[in-house]
Amino acid sequence: MVQKDPICGMDVDERSPKVIYTCPMHPEVEQDHPGDCPKCGMALESKNFPSQETNEADENQTLKRKFWIGLFLTLPVVFMAMSEMVLPTFTRYVQWILSTMVVFYCGGFLLVKGWQSLIHRHLNMFTLIALGVLVAYGYSTVALFLPQGLYLYFEASAVITVLVILGQWLETKARSQTGQAIKSLLGLAAKEAHIMKDGKEEQISIDQIQKGDILRVKPGEKIPLDGMIVEGQSTVDESMLTGEPMPVVRGVGERVMGATVNQTGTFVMRTERIGSETLLSQIVHMVSEAQRSRAPIQRLADQVAGYFVPAVIIISLITFFVWLLVGPQPVLTYALVNAIAVIIIACPCALGLATPMSIMVGVGRGAQAGILIKNAQAIEQCEKVTHVLIDKTGTLTEGKPKVTACIGLDPQWMVGLAASLEQNSEHPLARAVMNYAKEKSSKIEAVEHFESITGGGIKGQINGKTILVGKQKFMEESEIDISDDLKKQAMQLQDNAQTVVWVAMEGKAIGILGISDPIKKTTPDAIRALHDMGLKIVMLTGDNHKTAEVIAQQLGIDRIEAELDPKRKQEIVRRFKTEGAVVMMAGDGINDAPALAQAEVGVAMGTGTDVAIESAGITLVKGDLNGIVKALRLSRAVMTNIRQNLFFAFIYNALGIPIAAGVLYPFFGLLLSPIMAGAAMSFSSVSVIGNALRLRRLRI
């Protein structure tokens, strides 16, 4: 049986190349087989996330086995080294044999990574580890065959190797936990569905379902795929994708998402999206891509690491020669011990892990709350936002407007004309006009010479007569004759926060439609929360000033920009940026896409259009302004976590290197052995990862 990929929905045999491996710290590194990153030495991860679990499990088992074997062989070496004065001379050769097995069998992969770093001219933590271990082992091997009296450091080379393997093992286990969010998302997908064919119901596997198939969903079952309800009604728990605990009512004509849970009723749905098209697959893909992206702050760590390793080697050489010149007897022993300690404790693994671990965990935590982050740059920019620019329709409001007023000589006929032009439009106002026309049983006629004027309206010919539908400004620019009485009635509708749609025929306005779009229940609380965070709120809308002012007053919005077309929205975003503001733009429509792309951070509502989502750095699955509040809190927490990690890594090396070099010895007689340096180095990496994993429990 041909296996299907849970993310892309394709047959495994159809993909070429089958799997691409990349480095979490250096995404530009890609290859079609497992291996190590030539820049940092980290094991490459599969870009096709599900297949990565097997690789992680294999790596975990390999490191676990090598650690326990290494520990078993190292303990006798440590015992013999501590008891060397009372043990026979041949035990020195036993130490050599056991430590050789530890260094080259258990720790051989560390030496290979160190050698590769030299070949590729990218010095990293494995360069220092390999250098420190080989110096200790090589010196001891030479000393073993020289006259008695020289101290051996086989235990140091063996213990350091085992400690580094332990650190790598713990790091691999911790890194696997950062992907827990994606694993849990993949686990949400339904495995089977009830398909309706020829009046019969049959249970089949999800990968057999095609677009257009009719499925029955029973109480308590997971909704198989994305689609539309064609019969029945139920409450649906969407919390696994949106992060919102309250179930929602879904009925005929409404869309449902795969992996959500049907609660009380039975309904029949038509499948609209399968495989990689489903919302769950898009979420998994977006989260996986974002976790591999790099935040701009990572450049600081990269720049430091680029100079850090050569600097450490120089400091180690200086330490060796200083102790050789002024150290106590035996000078060679003190010089060697301290030089090795400097190399080992200075391994920049904590520095390299500081940013990627926080990004990976933060992106996963956001996905669990219905916040889909396209890349790490969006997280970093989000923290700096000063102004939030928000589209009105579908963002502040429900995006489900209804015609609440119809003024004209013959309302039913007029609505029919408007609906005839609007029938091909996907704009929320167009859908409202169409729904109203159906309610009034208005006649929908064929339209010729149809033309859409972006941000203004539409026009066309019906039965040889030119019809215009749109804004008042559009009418005035088209030199339409508008009566004062109609203007007065339009003003009254706008005073009640209704959007006015004008209808004209043959150069004269024949009526208006008042359309109301209620404010989302969650919007007022979200606006207050954004103000509490010190942000300025600006509403951008294509609606008229009067309607915009009424809504702005109700919500306490700081500023409005009304009667805008897509180009003007983009220009306003650009203007705010030139004035020094860091702009977050939130919208859901095609007309918002240019502004979303122009802003430092674009936020698309998951209920909006594909082009808006594609243009944004963050997508809110639920399409709720509270998602912006959550995204900002998440961003601030992630960036704080990154700074904590970087601070810890910098301070650790700043304090550790001088101590390892022996600056405390003249004052307190304290020295840091290579073994303790290896333990401290491993602890620093695990500490950084542990701090990053705290984000999994973040309450946003």
Image (spheres, rainbow, N blue to C red):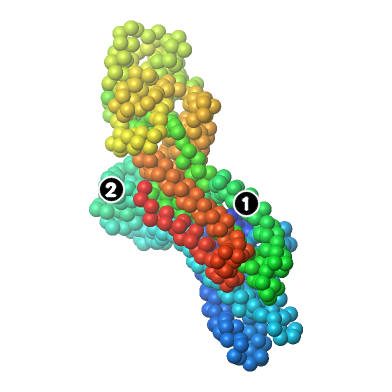
> Does residue 530 appear left or right of residue 363 in this picture?
left
520 vs 698: above or below: above
The amino acid type of the residue labelled 2 equals Met
Tell me where residue 587 appears, x and y as whole percent: 43, 34
Q: Residue at x 40, y 44 (%)?
A: 633
Residue at disc 1, secondary structure: helix
For marks 2 and 1, the one nearer the N-term is: 2
Tell me where residue 304 appears, x and y as whole percent: 62, 51
311 vs 136: above or below: above
Give the Cα distance between marks 2 and 1.
47 Å
Tell me the residue that label 1 is attached to.
Answer: 304
Q: Which mark is residue 246?
A: 2
Front residue (pair 176, 184): 176
Front residue (pair 106, 657): 657
Q: Residue at x 48, y 47 (%)?
A: 639
Dot 2: few (<14), some (14–19), or many (≥20) neighbours within 10 Å? few
Tell me where residue 432 appears, x and y as whole percent: 34, 29
The amino acid type of the residue labelled 1 equals Val
464 vs 698: above or below: above
Residue 577 visible in rendering: yes
Q: Which mark is residue 170?
A: none
From this viewpoint, which residue is outermost toward the bottom?
A: 88
Q: Residue at x 27, y 45 (%)?
A: 249
Front residue (pair 439, 655): 655
